[in-house]
Each structure stands twice: as structure tokens, then as C-alpha cells.
Image (spheres, rainbow, N blue to C red):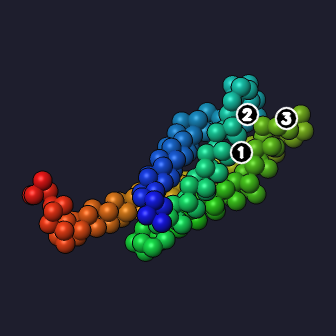
Amino acid sequence: MQALRRLALPVLVVHLWVTMTLFGAIVLETFMVYPNVFADPPASLELTMEFLAVSGPADFFPPLGFAAWVLGAAALVLNWRLPAVRWWVLLSLAMFVAEGVVSMLYFWPRNDIMFVEGAAVHSAEHLRQVAAEFTTWHGRSRMVFNTVAAGAAFTACAAAYRHRILARAAAGEHHPQTSPARA
């Protein structure tokens, strides 16, 4: 049991790292990539498909998002005994699950329309409409979910670290032989 307790903070730190990586990627995609992708549909969508032929968001976000789910669940279990940490980890995990579900149900079908089926199946007007829907709801859901998840994961890490420091300080008060002053 003690070994599991020692894993609580490192697992939480790795969850934070994945969370911040995802958050940074979403911010980059939103403010740097998407203005180019959605500049002039359907022409910009076709250019995007050519550019992202080797690797694209579908290769990056689903595996890293799943890692955030797994690490969030592990961090939640390992930090369950600390309410000040537990609820922040739960909030972060809930935001990732919500973002994943929204992506699968709303964004993935639109990605198929724009980047798989494209102009061969859909009219230019329909592609412009889908692109507008995508960008509008991306800002209203993905950005919000990832921002809250990142803030919650950071707060959870800070709370867990604070708990560890206070626990060590309290242990030092009860055990003078481990006090830094005696070392």
C-alpha cells in the first residue's frame, strides 16, 4: 500500500504533463493551424488534406487523449484519500471524457465530411457550413474542456505537492531525529 501511495504524485505529474501537452496542442491548433485550414473552404480543406497526408491530428489527439483518460483514472484512484486533490483530478478527468465524447459524436463525423469525403461527395456550400460549425463549436467546447482540464490538473498537482510537503514537515516535528536541523 505504501508503494502505491508513493506513486500518487508521480502519476499525477505525468497526467499533468499529458494534460498540458494536449492543452498546448489545442491552443496551437486553434490559433495557428485552424485559421489556415478553414480560411477558404473547400480549397483550404483540400490543401490541408495534401499537407497532412503523412500525419495529422487524428494520429496525435486520440492516443494522447486516451492516455489522459487512463492517467487521470490512475491519478484519481491513487489520490482518492486526499479530498483536496481528488476533486480536482476528477474535474480534469471529467473534462477529458466530455471532450472525447463530444469529439467522437460531433467533430469526428464533420472531419469525415471535410477531409475524407470532401468535394467529391459534398457541395462547396455544405463544406463551408460544416467548416463554420466545426470552428464555432471547437472554441465553445474543446477549448473550454481543455482549459478547465489543464487548470484542474495543475491545481491537483499543487494540492498533492502541498500535502506531501506538509506531511513531511509534520513527520519531522514528531521525529526529531529526521529533522533537517539535526542532520
Q: Residues within 10 Å of mark 3 (few under 14, many from 20)?
A: some
Q: Is residue 30 above or below residue 49?
A: below
Kindly identify which numbered label has been placed on residue 45: 2
Q: Residues within 10 Å of mark 1 (few under 14, many from 20)?
A: many
Q: Amino acid at mark 3?
A: Ala
Q: Is residue 44 above or below residue 80?
A: above
The residue closer to the viewer here, 118 or 128, is 118
Going 61% across and 56% down the picture, which residue do you hit? Answer: 69
Provide the residue designation for mark 1: 131
Disc 3 and disc 2 in contact, CB within 8 angstroms = yes
Looking at this view, name the residue that lies furthest to the right: 121
Check disc 2 and report its element: helix, strand or loop.
helix
Q: Is residue 67 above or below residue 33?
A: below
Q: Closer to the N terminus: mark 1 or mark 3?
A: 3
Residue 81 location (% of width, % of height): 45, 73
Residue 149 location (% of width, % of height): 51, 58
Q: Closer to the N terminus: mark 2 or mark 1?
A: 2
Check disc 1 and report its element: helix, strand or loop.
helix
Disc 2 and disc 1 in contact, CB within 8 angstroms = yes
The residue closer to the viewer here, 140 or 82, is 82
Instruction: Tell me if 95 is positioned left or right of 168 in this view.
Output: right
Instruction: Tell me if 47 is positioned left or right of 7 in this view.
Output: right
Disc 3/disc 2 C-alpha distance (Å): 9 Å
Going 43% across and 64% down the picture, which residue do you hit? Answer: 2
- Residue 21 visible, this angle: yes
Kindly identify which numbered label has been placed on residue 119: 3
Residue 31 location (% of width, % of height): 52, 40
Instruction: Tell me if 79 is positioned left or right of 98 in this view.
Output: left
Looking at this view, name the residue that lies furthest to the left: 181
Q: Is residue 168 above or below residue 108?
A: below
Going 73% across and 33% down the picture, which residue do you hit? Answer: 45
